[in-house]
Image: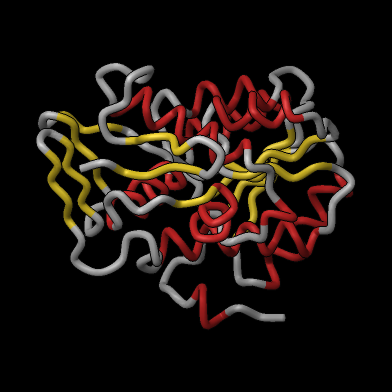
Amino acid sequence: MSSDWFYARAVPARVLVVDDEPMVREVVARYLELDGVLVEEASNGAEAMEWLDRNTADLIVLDVMLPEVDGLSILRRLRLTSDVPVILLTARSSEIDRIAGFELGADDYVVKPFSPREVAARVRTILRRGRIPAATGSGEFRGEFDGLTIDASTREVRVDGAMVVLTPKEFDLIALLARSPRHVFSRSGLLRLVWASSPDYQDSATVTVHVGRLRQKIEVDPQKPRWLHTVHGIGYRFEP
């Protein structure tokens, strides 16, 4: 099924697929190319880092268990300078492993064996959010909250004038919460609105980890947050 309506642009989206299994790269690439995506491939961590030193991608599909340089090490290095969306592929399905990936800045997590259609769908969802105004940050929304500024038109967040580097998911999350001050969002609701997926396909820990990372980046004291409040047993709210 073609998604030309979505990817129509002068330059197609460029996705780097990093996996040491040729069959995985081939299958994922085949489904992404059906959507008009330009796919680049790397078979190990060192090759991926060398490619990223010379090129840029709109999204990276990254295997965790890679030879030479593992996927989490690549993600850690990437987040020092880039907020490019990253979908992790891994045979590890434990909650601890998922949280480790999200804490390092992953945007999504797919457990092997997986359906290539599902991976392609998740890639489409993340790229769509970056190419057209998302529901969480559309329109002319610009919020100023006594030192915290959230600008949907530029997808920028500043604290006391200083730019805060956020991943795409982190921005979508803070923008959604800030657009509805004092409204309590459940974790399952945030999964549907920000990650565009049913809670059946995501763990509520995804939301918890992203809120924790946001607090580390925007709050003076993450243990006593000023803006991002937990409503125990339910979810989160933004307090202006």
Toward the viewer: 95 or 154? Answer: 95
Residue at horizontal 72 percent and vertical 24 percent from the top: 96
Residue located 60% across and 78% down the image:
3
- Answer above or below: position of 210 versus 182: above
Q: Estimate the x, y position of residue 107 in percent, counting from the top left.
A: 56, 43
Q: Is residue 14 visible?
A: no
Q: Is residue 5 above or below residue 205?
A: below
**Residue 81 location, x and y as percent?**
39, 28
Residue 26, visible in the rendered structure: yes
Question: Would you say 172 lies left or right of 205 here?
Answer: left
Q: Quadrant of the C terminus?
A: top left
Which one is in front, 129 or 191? 191
Q: Quadrant of residue 87?
A: top right
What residue appears at the point 49 percent right and 55 percent down from the top-left corner?
Answer: 194
Residue 235 x %, y %: 50, 43
Judge by depth and name the residue closer to the eye, 214 or 234: 234
Q: Nearer the viewer, residue 86 or 228?
A: 228
5 to 118, vertically: above or below? below
Judge left or right: residue 20 versus residue 145: right
Residue at 80% across, 59% down: 116
Location of residue 1 in the rendering, given as x and y in whole percent from the top left corner: 72, 81
**Colouring chosen for the image of the structure:** secondary structure
Q: Is residue 142 left or right of residue 126?
A: left
